[in-house]
Every structure is written in structure tokens, then in C-alpha cells.
Image (spheres, rainbow, N blue to C red):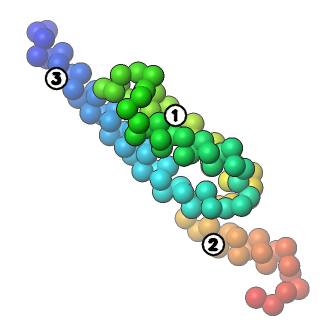
Amino acid sequence: MDSTVWLVLAAVAALIMLALAVVLLVRVVRARKLLADAGIPLRDKALVWAAIIYTVSPVDLLPDPVYLDDIGFLLVALRSLHAAASAAGVRTGAGGRERSRRSEVESHPDAVH
């Protein structure tokens, strides 16, 4: 293969990694509702903000065409936040109000809702 094929393959790989990093960054930003919940430890909240800052900062462990370090840090932050939310009993997906309402009714069965 000649050099233009390798350059095209490298450009496609870089674009795929960039797209994945952007998707994960959007998922982390959308998870900010969990950051307001008092039941989630500060350590997990700080990890999310650190991941966002690391992703947009120009300082990286790997040079910027390689987004594997950004992707890894965002994945760790998302998994940590969702694990902390699960441990705190916070619903992280759709239908969170229904589940919290159900647990509210179960914890106070005599109360009028």
C-alpha cells in the first residue's frame, strides 16, 4: 500500500476516535443531573468534572489525534458516576421519577400521596 492509503486510514481512525470522545463527553454532560443529587459522593462528582476538563484541555497523555486517553477517562467517569448513583438508590435512566415515587410509597405506606 502506498502512503496515501495509510494517511486515509489514519484520518478515518482519528475521526472515529474523535466521534467516540464527543459522544462520551455529551453523555457525561447529560449526566450532570446526577451531580445535583445529594446521595452521590463528592469524589464521583469531582471525577466527572475532571474528565470534562481533561477532555477539552490541550494537555494530554497522548497526542491529540489519538483520543484513547480521553475516551478512557470519560468511560471511567461515567461508570463511576452511575455506580455511585446505583449505590445511592438514584435511578439513572428513563423512568427515574416513577421508581423514586414507588420507593417513596413503599417507605411510607400509610401516608396519603
**Pointer 1 residue:** 73
**Pointer 3 residue:** 8
Q: For the view shown, which residue lies furthest in the top direction?
A: 1
Q: For the view shown, which residue lies furthest in the bottom direction?
A: 112
Query: Gap between marks 1 and 3, in whole Å?
Result: 27 Å
Q: Which residue type carries mark 2?
A: Arg
Q: Report the residue at 59% width, 68% height from top.
A: 95
The quadrant in which the C terminus is found is bottom right
The crowding category of the residue bearing disc 3, from other C-alpha atoms within 10 Å (few below 14, some 14 to 19, many at least 20), is: few
- Residue 92, given in percent of the width and then of the height, sits at 60, 58
User: Which residue is more in the foreground, 73 or 12?
Assistant: 73
- Residue 96, given in percent of the width and then of the height, sits at 62, 67
Rendered image: mark on residue 59: none
The crowding category of the residue bearing disc 1, from other C-alpha atoms within 10 Å (few below 14, some 14 to 19, many at least 20), is: some
Helix, strand, or loop for circle 3?
Answer: helix
Q: Which residue type carries mark 1?
A: Phe
Looking at the rendering, which quadrant does residue 59 occupy?
Answer: top left
Helix, strand, or loop for circle 2?
Answer: helix
In primary-sequence order, the first of circles 2 and 1 is 1
Q: Which residue type carries mark 3?
A: Val
